[in-house]
Image: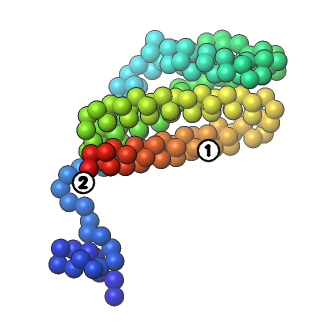
Amino acid sequence: MIAAMTATNPNAVFPAPPVGKDLRFVPLFLGIFLALHFLYTLGRGGEVERVVLDVLTVQPAVALINFITPSEQVMAQGHRLVSPQAALSVLGGCEGIEGILLLVAALSAFRLAWQDRLLGMAIGTAFIYALNLLRIMGLYYVFRYQRDWFDIAHAYVGSTVIILLGCLFFLFWANRSMARAE
């Protein structure tokens, strides 16, 4: 017979459900994420979105592509990566903000020392940002050389990899921080 682990039955197979502060993580995480996403949404269509898309996403992606393959001759034109062979638009939702906001919300909601939270947010943001630039760069190459794979690479592969690696970063950072605290 399988029983839940409780204070009265410490030899049981399953751990007892979390109590107290541990139960606050999910609603706190969701509330923080939704609030951050709402605040970012307020800046869509304006200068904030232009800076995030054009300056912080497209221009560095173009620089990376031209560094790796100068023969592509890619140029940044607003929110577009344009070469003689292909043109790719980077629209809202492709800038990696959701992954960053998920990580920031998770680190904010989890019980960590404030120094660990802030450092995790800074390093995690840089990590997700770099992953998204690699994603944009990869999408350019897929669009340029294998267009029939683009929809799958865009909608599923790149986003899933970023979210998965963001979750792994959160787990690594939380474990690291909790081990340091002990």
Does the image show residue 32?
Answer: no
Residue at screen point 78% across, 22% down: 69
The residue located at (72%, 19%) in the rendering is: 67
Kindly identify the amino acid type of the residue bearing the numbered disc 2. Asp
Q: Is residue 43 above or below residue 119?
A: above
Q: Position of residue 59 (x, y in %)?
A: 61, 15
Write the residue at 26% across / 34% down.
Answer: 114
171 shown above or below 91: below
| Of pointers 2 and 1, the one earlier in the residue sequence | 2
Question: Which element type, helix, strand or loop, lies under badge 2?
Answer: helix
Cα separation between marks 2 and 1: 32 Å
Residue annotated with mark 1: 156
- Label 2, residues with CA under 10 Å away: few <14, some 14-19, many ≥20: few
Does residue 87 appear left or right of residue 159 in this picture? right
List x then y, in percent, for residue 45: 47, 17
Q: Quadrant of residue 135?
A: top right
- Asked whether, in this view, residue 111 is left or right of residue 171, the answer is left
Identify the disc placed on residue 164: none
Which residue is more in the foreground, 146 or 70?
70
The reply to whether residue 128 is in sight is yes
Residue under pointer 2? 22
Figure quadrant of the N terminus: bottom left
Q: Which residue sits at x=44%, y=15%?
A: 48
Residue 178 x, y percent position in the rendering: 31, 48
Applied colour scheme? rainbow
Work out whether residue 42 or residue 157 is closer to the camera in this orientation and state it.
157
Residue 54 horizontal/vertical position (percent): 57, 15
Amino acid of disc 1: Tyr
Task: Classify residue 37 as left or right of residue 130.
Answer: left
